Structures are given as structure tokens and as C-alpha cells.
């Protein structure tokens, strides 16, 4: 189906060739909004297809999947698509799903699926028409293949590069005239393709923000006030300056940085600063204080998100009422590439080199700090060595520009692993209360879910916060996959003092799916029912959800919650436009949980690259196991207690389970794949731990919960 909101422009490219501009207005844009291009496709005279990529690559496969959409409809080989990072420009490179230039929210393929295909098809039609005119034949007698237009009757052939200039002079086909390929004719889409970014990552030529090298560049190590809301009182600058290679000490209100010829010298100088801090108003703040405040806030009022089927009356008539409180901790991102940013501030310009998911916001904060107009700030974007939502934030860029203002040279600011973890912007802490009324057969007649926690979207994109809540925080709770006869969902916003919260490979689903799927398991146990059959009985009107659940169970060989000393747990969800179910096998070995096997079934609509889908599931499973078993950021005396991987533990290679991914064939619109696996894994693992140990996990992380039992 042609998207009526798609617009194209075709013109001659500078230096020859065909330039195609694609405009996909934001979903928030009003009808009749001004035409704005947000992707650029250029077919050069040599036949190469250059795509200015409006999204960024951070391991999720975007730099392969998006070119596949263009190459499929344009009929070129994937190796002939050349990618360029997009410059900062919200108008030119808008993400239509989110309203500005951003990579996040598992939206990339969902936003690009139709427009990129239409752009490729339109370009193909122009090239075929150009060849037909030159040969004076009917365009329908010509076909395109592998970057060549052919006329079968005469055997004539002409490469795209030779036709691009003539094609640029032709009028674009009307949107309704653009003919897309049928799924049975796909040559690339749906077929496993090697990642285009893999060779550079294997041979070391791939460039990340931390790899930047510039003439005369210095390197800075920094220390940020350890207590949130604190400030710097004093330091011993002379001691640091005695270190060979140290050039300068920069003092800010909440930070100190040592600038040196190399990172080793900078770190040594930093260790000698004898920093003195004022811990500020949160000097005594602890995690227990935050949770107590949340519990009080939950009793004082809430926004009504949903109330269907008279839940209060239904609860009053229930044969039995179950309730539980779930708590999910603050979590750090701990990406492989720690936060870093290189900046050169000059009187009339500022250059920033970094890897960011929000390039225009990075430019804006650099302009604000320097006082320069935005057009005098250039952000050079790079591959990201892990994002997970951390690089949707601009605090690292702001800090680097503040330091760079005091330095005459370009300066690369690198956060140590300790600073990266202790001054992350954390996945929020959540405190949820759930209740269910059951009938005589143990099936729910009323469902209540009261969420209390931070609204990341309320800070990040304030217009999205309406009527006391935002859709992202409620994702997975407002519309669970089950047909409850009566349901009520409430939300209380609670922002912890001076503690920044942010997206963490999802926010709403990572906690809501855990709560819903954990409590559903409790209801099944109360009804003495098989968790699989109990769930299926509640989703008879949700065939896609039921299908993935049955598929995962079948592939896992589900025959109950135990297999010897191995516990088995289930989960099913609809999040980020994707249906997913998991079966997790886990057992207790010497007091520690070992995950043995994870079986995932996924219906994410049309699949572009199945290898990417499987890789995303595997990555999300490992990320989710780490978070569910060990992830816990705690506060004492206003400080984060964890500092590195010895006390903020992540899964090791030898601990990684066997992971199977089974993809449902579908013609539905694509769903997101970057985040769903993490939220699906966590409750399935907790349910497996219950099956193995008899211990219900209502407070993560699991390792801490088991130690406390």
C-alpha cells in the first residue's frame, strides 16, 4: 500500500547523477505541513547508490537493513550501496515516528519500511523510463536488474550510472503509480544478508567516537561530584601538574578534569588532585529513602490511565483476591564504549566528534554552552559502541564542551568505567502494586495495576506527557495481551531527587512486562493451572500473541514447569510493535542461577534481515539476563555504590545459554526488534527461578532476592 504521506523530489546531482529526496512527514505533523526532505538517495555516474543515512548504527544492523530496502526496489546489489552519516538537521532527517532526528525506540525499520522502498522503486522507474526514451521503446518492454536496465528484444543494456543524468530530468511518477515488488519477488528482503559494517569492525577500520585522532589533540580524564547534587570545593592543582604530560587542570562547579598528552597521564594527574566536595542536599540520600518516598507517593494520588468493565464492582464479587508489590531497581547501561566526546572550541566555531543517537540535540547543547549560533556548530557523528538509550542523552556532550571552552587545543574527554557507571542516567526505579480478583475456577474477573516511577519521556519529550502519564511508561501495562473482563491501570509519577533517569533498552516494557507476566504466573499457581494453558485461555482474542506463545512452547518442548532440577518459565508480550514469547530453562548451581536455554518465538511482521532479528534476540537475551540476575544501582550517602563490572556484574561468555530464535512468517507491517527481547526475558527467567526454587521473585535483581531468602 502506498503511504499517502510520502513525497519525493528528483533532480540532477552536483557532478552528475540522479538525486532523490524523500520526505516522510512526522506522525505529529498536521496535514498540509511544509514539504521537508528527510532522506537523500543519490545515484552517481559510476552507478554507486549513495544513501545519506538519517539513522545511526550502534550494533542493531541499521546500516544493513535500510540499504536492503533501497536495494530491493531499486534492483541493485547490496554491495553497491554506500552509506554516509547524516549531518545534524531535524528538518532534513526527521524520524517520523518521534518527530526529530533521532535513532531510538525500536522505530527505525518501522519508520523506513515503506518510504525507503518507495524511493527505490521510484528511482528504478525513472531509470527505466530514461533508457526507454533513449532506445525509443515502450518502458514496459524494459526491466532493471543488478544496476542495469535491459531491453530483452534488442539485447541492449545500459548501466544506471549512464542513465542517472537523464533520469534526473524526468518528472517523478505519481505516488499512486509507484509499483512495489510483491513479497514472493523479493531478492533481498527476508533473506539473510551479511552485515555491511562487519568488515570494518573486523579489520579495525570502523571508526567510533573514542577513536578520534586530531592534530594537536589533548586527552582529558574527569571526576564528577560523587554525590548527586553536590559541587566541587577545592583541589590540589600543583600536584597534578607535576605529572609528565599533564598540561592543564580544568575546574567546573561539579567536575574537575585533567588535560594531558595522553589518557594515562591524565588519569594519573586526576588521582593526585586531592579533590574536596560539598555533597549538597542529598548527602544522606539512600535507596531506602527513595523507595519509601515512592511508597508514600503511591498512596497520595494517581492518574487514571484506564478503567474498563467496572473493576471495583467485579473485585467485590470475586471468590478470591490476590495482590503483590513488585520493585525494579535503577539500572546502568554499561555500554562497551564508555562515554566520550572530542571538542574543539574556537572563537567563531565549535566542532564536536562523538557517537550520538540525537545529533541535533548534541549540536544545540554545544551552541548553548559556547554561545555560538547553531550554524557555527558542527557535530561529526560516528558508530556507537553500544547505545541502549544512553546516547539519547547529551550530558556527556555538554560536559565535554564546558571543559573544551577552557582548552586551546582539541580535547578528547573520556569517562572512566567508574564515572560511566556512577554518573550514568539510569533506568528508573519502579514500585508497582497489582491486584486480581479470581472466580471459582481461578480465572481473573478483575485486574488492577498501579505503577509508580519516573517518566523518562516526560523529561525527554514533554509534549508526550498528557493527563498525568505518557504512553512509553505505560507500554505493556495499559494494554496487556490478555482479555481481562475488568481492568484498571493507574500511574503515579515520582522523580527521585537529582537522580537522572533515562531510556534503557526500553523503559515501560522492561518493567511492565515483568510485573504482568510475573503476576500472571502467580495467578496460574493459585489456580493450580499450567502457566501455558492459563495464559492461552486469556488470549483467545489475541491470535498473534497466542501463536508466538504456542510456538515457543512447542520448540522448547514444554511439558510443565520442571524438567528434573531445571525450572522452566514463560513470558509473552506485545511491545514496540512486536509479538514475542520466551521459554527459559534455569537451575540453581552452588547457590547461583544458571540459565541453560532460552527459546524465543517472534512475530515482528515482515522481516527484512532474519540474521539481524536473531542477533537482536541473542543480544537482548544476554542484556536481559544480566539485568535480571545482577543489575542493581544503589545509593548510599547520595552516592552510587557500584563502580565497575566487579560489583555491577554482566553475563560472561561461559555463562551464556543456548539461545534459539524462531521467526513467524508474516505480511504484517514491521515491528521493532532492538528492545523487545530484553523485556520478554526478565519475567520468563524469574518464573523459571520460581519453578526451580519455589521462591517468587517480586524484587529484582534475582541474585540479591535469593540471597535474602
Image: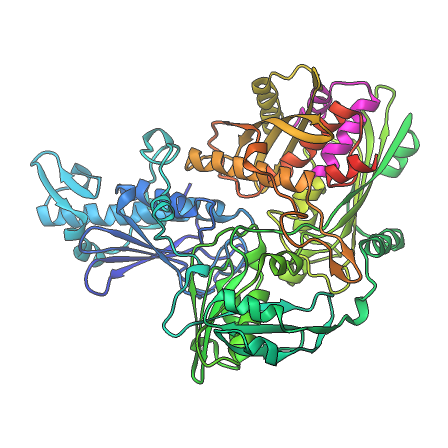
Tell me the quarter of the image containing the N terminus. Answer: top left
Magenta stretch: includes residue 531? yes
Q: Position of residue 28 (x, y in %)?
A: 55, 57
Q: Which residue is found at the position 71% from the left and 19% from the top?
A: 561
Magenta stretch: includes residue 226? no
Against 69, is 485 above or below? above
Q: Which residue is found at the position 72% from the left and 28% from the top?
A: 590
Return the residue found at the far bottom: 347
Q: Looking at the image, can residue 139 be seen?
A: yes
Return the residue found at the far left: 154
Quadrant of res 249: bottom right
Against 405, is 654 above or below? above
Q: Position of residue 549 (x, y in %)?
A: 62, 25
Q: Position of residue 413 (x, y in %)?
A: 52, 68
In this rendered view, identify the residue nearer to me: 292 or 517.
Answer: 292
Left-right relation of 404 to 117? right
Left-right relation of 64 to 491? left
Q: Looking at the image, can residue 542 be seen?
A: no
Q: Which portion, as a residue range, is magenta?
A: 513-541
Against 353, is 241 above or below? below
Tell me the quarter of the image containing the C terminus. Answer: top right
Q: Position of residue 301 (x, y in %)?
A: 86, 54
Amino acid at each position: 500500500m502506498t503511504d499517502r504521506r510520502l513525497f519525493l523530489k528528483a533532480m540532477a546531482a552536483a557532478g552528475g547523477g540522479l538525486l532523490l529526496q524523500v520526505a516522510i512527514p512526522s506522525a505529529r505533523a498536521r496535514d498540509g505541513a511544509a514539504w521537508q526532505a528527510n532522506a537523500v538517495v543519490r545515484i552517481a555516474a559510476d552507478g554507486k547508490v549513495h544513501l545519506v543515512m538519517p539513522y545511526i548504527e550502534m550494533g542493531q544492523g541499521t546500516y544493513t537493513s535500510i540499504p536492503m530496502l533501497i536495494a530491493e526496489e531499486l534492483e541493485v546489489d547490496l554491495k553497491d550501496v554506500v552509506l554516509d552519516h547524516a549531518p545534524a538537521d531535524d528538518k532534513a532527517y526527521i524520524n517520523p515516528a518521534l518527530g526529530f532526528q533521532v535513532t531510538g525506540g525500536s522505530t527505525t525499520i518501522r519508520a523506513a519500511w515503506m518510504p525507503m522502498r518507495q524511493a527505490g522503486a521510484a528511482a528504478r522507474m525513472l531509470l527505466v523510463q530514461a533508457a526507454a526514451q533513449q532506445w525509443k521503446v515502450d518502458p514496459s518492454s524494459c526491466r532493471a536488474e543488478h544496476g542495469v536496465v535491459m531491453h530483452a528484444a534488442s539485447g541492449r543494456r545500459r548501466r544506471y550510472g549512464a542513465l542517472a543524468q537523464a533520469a534526473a530530468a524526468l518528472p517523478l511518477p505519481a505516488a499512486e503509480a509507484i509499483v512495489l515488488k510483491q513479497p514472493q519477488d523479493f531478492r533481498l528482503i527476508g533473506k539473510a544478508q551479511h552485515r555491511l559494517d562487519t568488515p570494518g569492525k573486523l579489520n579495525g577500520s570502523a571508526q567510533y567516537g573514542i577513536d578520534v585522532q586530531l592534530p594537536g589533540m589533548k586527552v582529558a580524564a574527569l571526576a564528577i561530584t560523587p554525590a548527586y547534587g553536590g559541587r566541587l570545593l577545592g583541589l590540589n592543582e600543583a600536584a597534578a601538574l607535576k605529572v609528565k604530560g599533564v598540561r592543564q587542570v580544568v575546574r567546573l562547579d561539579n567536575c574537575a578534569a585533567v588535560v594531558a598528552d595522553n589518557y594515562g597521564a591524565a588519569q594519573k594527574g586526576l588521582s593526585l588532585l586531592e579533590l574536596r566536595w560539598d555533597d549538597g542536599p542529598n548527602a544522606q540520600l539512600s535507596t531506602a529513602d527513595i523507595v519509601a518516598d515512592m511508597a508514600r507517593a503511591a498512596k497520595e494520588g494517581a492518574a487514571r490511565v484506564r478503567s474498563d468493565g467496572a473493576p471495583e464492582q467485579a473485585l467485590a464479587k470475586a471468590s478470591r483476591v490476590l495482590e503483590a508489590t513488585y520493585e525494579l531497581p535503577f539500572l546502568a547501561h554499561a555500554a562497551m564504549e564508555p562515554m566520550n566526546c572530542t571538542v574543539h572550541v574556537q572563537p567563531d566555531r565549535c566542532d564536536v566528534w562523538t557517537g550520538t543517537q540525537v545529533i541535533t540535540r548534541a549540536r544545540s547543547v554545544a551552541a548553548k554552552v559556547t554561545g555560538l549560533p547553531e550554524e557555527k556548530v558542527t557535530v561529526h557523528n560516528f558508530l556507537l559502541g553500544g547505545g541502549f538509550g544512553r546516547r539519547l542523552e547529551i550530558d556527556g556532550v555538554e560536559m565535554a564542551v564546558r571543559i573544551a571552552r577552557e582548552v586551546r587545543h582539541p580535547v578528547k574527554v573520556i569517562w572512566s568505567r567508574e564515572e560511566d557507571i556512577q554518573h550514568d542516567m539510569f533506568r528508573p526505579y519502579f514500585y508497582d502494586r497489582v491486584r486480581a480478583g479470581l472466580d471459582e475456577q481461578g480465572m481473573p474477573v478483575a485486574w488492577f495495576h498501579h505503577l509508580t516511577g519516573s517518566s523518562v519521556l516526560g523529561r525527554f519529550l514533554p509534549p508526550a506527557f498528557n493527563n498525568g502519564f505518557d504512553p512509553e511508561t505505560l507500554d505493556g501495562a495499559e494494554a496487556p495481551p490478555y482479555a481481562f473482563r475488568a481492568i484498571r491501570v493507574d500511574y503515579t509519577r515520582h522523580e527521585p531527587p537529582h537522580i537522572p533517569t533515562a531510556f534503557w533498552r526500553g523503559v515501560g516494557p522492561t518493567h511492565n512486562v515483568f510485573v504482568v507476566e510475573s503476576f500472571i504466573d502467580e495467578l496460574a499457581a493459585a489456580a493450580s493451572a499450567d502457566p501455558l494453558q492459563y495464559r492461552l485461555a486469556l488470549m483467545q482474542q489475541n491470535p498473534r500473541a497466542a501463536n508466538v506463545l504456542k510456538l515457543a512452547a512447542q520448540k522448547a518442548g514444554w511439558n510443565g514447569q520442571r524438567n528434573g532440577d531445571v525450572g522452566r518459565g514463560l513470558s509473552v508480550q506485545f511491545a514496540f510493535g512486536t509479538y514475542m514469547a520466551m521459554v527459559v530453562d534455569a537451575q540453581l548451581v552452588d547457590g547461583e542461577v544458571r540459565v541453560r536455554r532460552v527459546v524465543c518465538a517472534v512475530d515482528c511482521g515482515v522481516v527484512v534481515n532474519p540474521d539481524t532479528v536473531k542477533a537482536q534476540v541473542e543480544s537482548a537475551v544476554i542484556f536481559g539476563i544480566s539485568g535480571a540476575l545482577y543489575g542493581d544501582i544503589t545509593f548510599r550517602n547520595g552516592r552510587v555504590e557500584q563502580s565497575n563490572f566487579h560489583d555491577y556484574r554482566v553475563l560472561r561468555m561461559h555463562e551464556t545459554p543456548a539461545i534459539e530464535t524462531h521467526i513467524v512468517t508474516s505480511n504484517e507491517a514491521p515491528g521493532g526488534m532492538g528492545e523487545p527481547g530484553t523485556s520478554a526475558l526478565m519475567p520468563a527467567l524469574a518464573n523459571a527461578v520460581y519453578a526451580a526454587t519455589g521462591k517468587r521473585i517480586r524484587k529484582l535483581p534475582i541474585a540479591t532476592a535469593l540471597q535474602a531468602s
